Image (cartoon, rainbow, N blue to C red):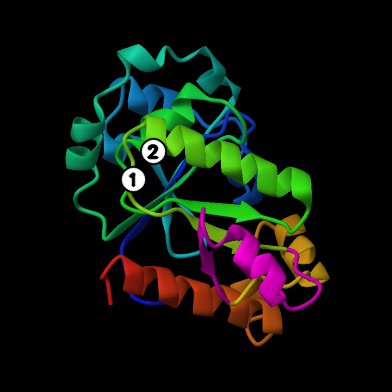
Amino acid sequence: EYGKKVLVIDADPSAGLTFACGIENPRVSTKEFLTGQFSVDASIIKSGERFSIIASSSRLLAIDIDQAISPAKLIELLASFDLVIIDTPTGVSRITTYFMASADLIVLPSTTEILSLRGALNSKDYAESAGHSGQLQLLITKATQLLDDEFKSLIDEDFALLEPTIRSSLQVSASQSQAKSVLTLDTKSEVAADYREITYLLLEKLELI
């Protein structure tokens, strides 16, 4: 919606994002791209939502990340895109650390539940070990109420809190079941407005607008 040339890389072997885009069993996946078997152009699939995607599959589990192209080479190959969004696995993963090393901005989606926030704190440690020096951005999703000042003060030392939060909405699940974005299927909904506002904020942080 903001007129940027966007590439999404699904770097999660569970391929949830790939499936959400209506893609299954891609011929070329993130694994083949990262190991240099296929070019960017040969790896991307045009989605129905005005962005390109490099799809994932369970084959990514077999990757030897030491044999992947270097982070510097990755940046060079993706230079034609205004914005590259990479969806990485949750938990401990060398794949995640690999991408963190070349990220300009790291966004950690989380709920307000303690286990989810604990996972975000673990990601903070891995980002630091990967050499990422920027402050991590925490995005609260599935929010059912406004965040209070006590919660904000608890996370303030470790993260930059992105606001607004993404409210809990059945419209998101409904759109996923149709392999569509809520911005497409329910463009005037409150949750769509949340996503637009967060997107604009992130583009500002990246100095893309």
Cα gap from disc 2 to disc 1, whole angstroms? 5 Å
Element at label 1:
loop
Task: Answer whether residue 25 is magenta in the image.
Answer: no
Callout 2 crowding tier (Cα within 10 Å): few <14, some 14–19, many ≥20: many
Residue 11 lies left or right of residue 153; in this view the side is left
Is 85 situated above or below 174?
A: above
Pick the front one: 160 or 198: 160
Depth check, front residue: 155 or 169: 155
Percent from the top left, x then y, of residue 200?
42, 77
Pointer 2 residue: 100
Name the residue type under label 1: Ala
Residue 124: x and y, percent? 50, 42
Q: Is residue 131 above or below residue 148?
A: above
Can you give x and y, in whole percent of width and height, for residue 104 in the image?
Answer: 31, 51
Q: Is residue 159 magenta?
A: yes
Quadrant, the N terminus: bottom left
Instruction: Answer left or right for 98 relative to 199.
Output: left
* Among the 4 quarters of the image, the one containing residue 165: bottom right
Residue at the (51%, 53%) spot, across then down: 158
Q: What numbered label is drawn on residue 103?
A: 1
Q: Residue furthest bottom?
A: 188
- Residue at screen point 63% across, 68% down: 152
The residues colored magenta run 142-163
Badge 1 density bin: few <14, some 14–19, many ≥20, Cα 10 Å:
some
The percent coordinates of residue 134 (x first, y second) are 34, 51
Residue 185 visible in the shown view: yes
Query: Would residue 181 be seen by someone viewing this image from the given angle?
Result: no
**Numbered disc 2: secondary structure:** helix
For the point 40% across and 37% down, which residue is it? 128
Mark 2 in CB contact with mark 1 (< 8 angstroms): yes
Q: Amino acid at mark 2?
A: Met
